[in-house]
Image: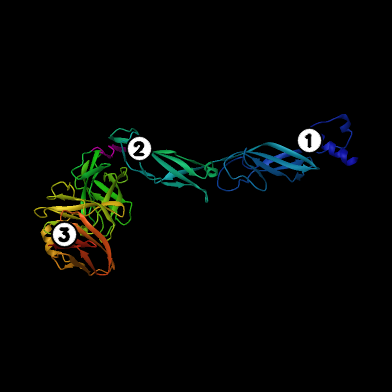
Amino acid sequence: MRKTTHFFLVLLAVMGLSTAWASTLPTTPTYTVQWTGETNVTYNGQPQNGLSASYVDGNSVSHTLTLTFTNGTEVITSPNYPVHAGAWTVTASTNVLGVILENTTAMLNIQPATVYVTGATAERAKFADGTLNGVVIDNGVLNGVFGNDNVDVLTTAIFSDANVGSSKTITLYYALVGDANTLNNYVVSPSSQLYTTSGVVIPNMLPNTNYPAAADMETQNGIEVSTYGYCTGTGYSIAYHLISGNPDQYRIDFADNRITDVDWTDLSTAGANGTLDITLPVGLPTGDYTMNVIFRDSRFPALESNPLTATVHANLSETYTMPLFNDVIALVDTCNCLSNIQWYHRGSAAEAWTAIPGATAYYYREEGGLTGEYFVSVTMNGVPTFTCPQTDMQTLIADESPSITVSAYPNPTTDNVNVTIDGSAANSHILRVISMMGAEIESRNFEGTTTTLDMRNYQLGNYMVSVDGMVVRVIKK
């Protein structure tokens, strides 16, 4: 009973209550809280343990206590202490004879640390795109960050106005980025700085998508490319057309790493219309290749135009076509993979290509003899492509000496002719017989190096006999 009565009296003392009945009992000592240390500090990346408190009774005896810190989302109890910036409510508590005594009036304010930026740079020019945003070259270095805190700076360059012209004011604005829990521990000051008063707004470099292309060319995003492709191992000048802007340099990035990119190169003539130089490497497989063309004004090297995308086509080698005689040229199909044939002709490089009506066979015969240049539009393994042009027909006929040859005996013949292929490593071959008008008369496979062709039912005249694309002229008498 005595222990219970003392406990009750302790409660009365804490609550500041008194009764006549209680005054007749022994006096219970009073307790006060004493706070020491700073209540306003600055974040330093370490636990803030400078604030402390103690309970002292009437006999000047200190009692063990516990500190509890809360900022509305976190609750931290000593011997742990808060680290992050913010306003923390501090509760001191201790257990005296089984009673928890509390005082919640103390506040601990941890102020954010101040950081600053050095070395931020921006391009002093921008394109006229209707916005005030400039191009930041370097975000700069954030100074004053503690330890391994994940916080950095994002710099924005803002022009005073968006109109084309000079003497623009550029202001750099700084924003902190990083871990959300860490960002509140810092404030950047100053948050903006005047960078320059000599900014420039220049016209944007935009493609002329409606520019009328030259003969045998097509315009893709302001870039003129050949409708009939390009030969590998040869350099080409490709025209470009812009509706605005005045670039003096260009760069070309190819999507396929087999083609070497073109680093920044001076245009032969600065301006909205000009030419670019490209080369497709020898041995590049036939097909379409994507390139991105970027322009810039070399006075402002960090300011690049949006990429203009175009596709160039790599052709089959000119060896896929072969002049056989003064009036006959053949498509050489050693891969047995070519179809959908269409022959084209032009008299010289200054003329446009013209599809030859009805010339859809492996061979084309030109009345009066071969002249000018020829190429073939063809499908190879299901993919449309072109052969590179054959030129200088007479020279090719005189110089042609293939390692694989086809011969026929007897020739002329009245019935059968033995056709032999020499120099081929293959054992299986395709034989085709084509009339001088380009019509296929017969097609079949044979094994070995020699096969017999029965021509008894053929009309009298000249025929082209092809074995794997190699041709010999056979005369039926």
Instruction: Tell us which disc is closer to us: 3 or 2.
Output: 3
Residue 393 figure quarter = bottom left
Q: Which residue is mark 3?
A: 463
Q: Position of residue 246 (x, y in %)?
A: 24, 41
Q: Nearer the viewer, mark 1 or mark 3?
A: 3
Is residue 233 visible to us here?
Answer: no
Question: Is 283 a magenta residue?
Answer: no
- Check contact, mark 1 vs mark 3: CB within 8 A: no
Q: Residue 86 appears at what percent x and percent y? A: 58, 39
Relative depth, front residue between 325 and 89:
325
Question: Quick one: 369 or 181, which is closer to the camera?
Answer: 369
Single out the residue that lies furthest toward the top.
20
Q: Residues within 10 Å of mark 2 (few under 14, many from 20)?
A: many
Nearest the viewer among 249 and 461 is 461
Question: What is the CA distance from the residue labelled 3 to the residue labelled 2?
Answer: 79 Å
Q: Which residue is mark 2?
A: 170
Per the rendered image, the range of residues in magenta is 196-210
Number of marks in the rendered image:
3
The 10 Å Cα crowd at callout 3, few under 14, some 14 to 19, many 20 or more, is: many
In the rendered structure, which disc, 1 or 2, sits on the residue that comes first in sequence? Answer: 1
Amino acid on which disc 1 is placed = Val
Asked whether the residues under the numbered discs 3 and 2 touch, taking CB atoms below 8 Å apart as contact, a structural biologist would say no
Q: Which residue is mark 1?
A: 14
Q: Residue at x 68, y 40 (%)?
A: 35
- From the viewer's perspective, is 27 left or right of 258? right
Which amino acid, mark 2?
Ile
Front of the two marks 1 and 2: 2
* SS at mark 1 in the image: helix
Report helix, strand or loop for mark 2. strand
Name which residue lies at 20% across and 50% down: 237
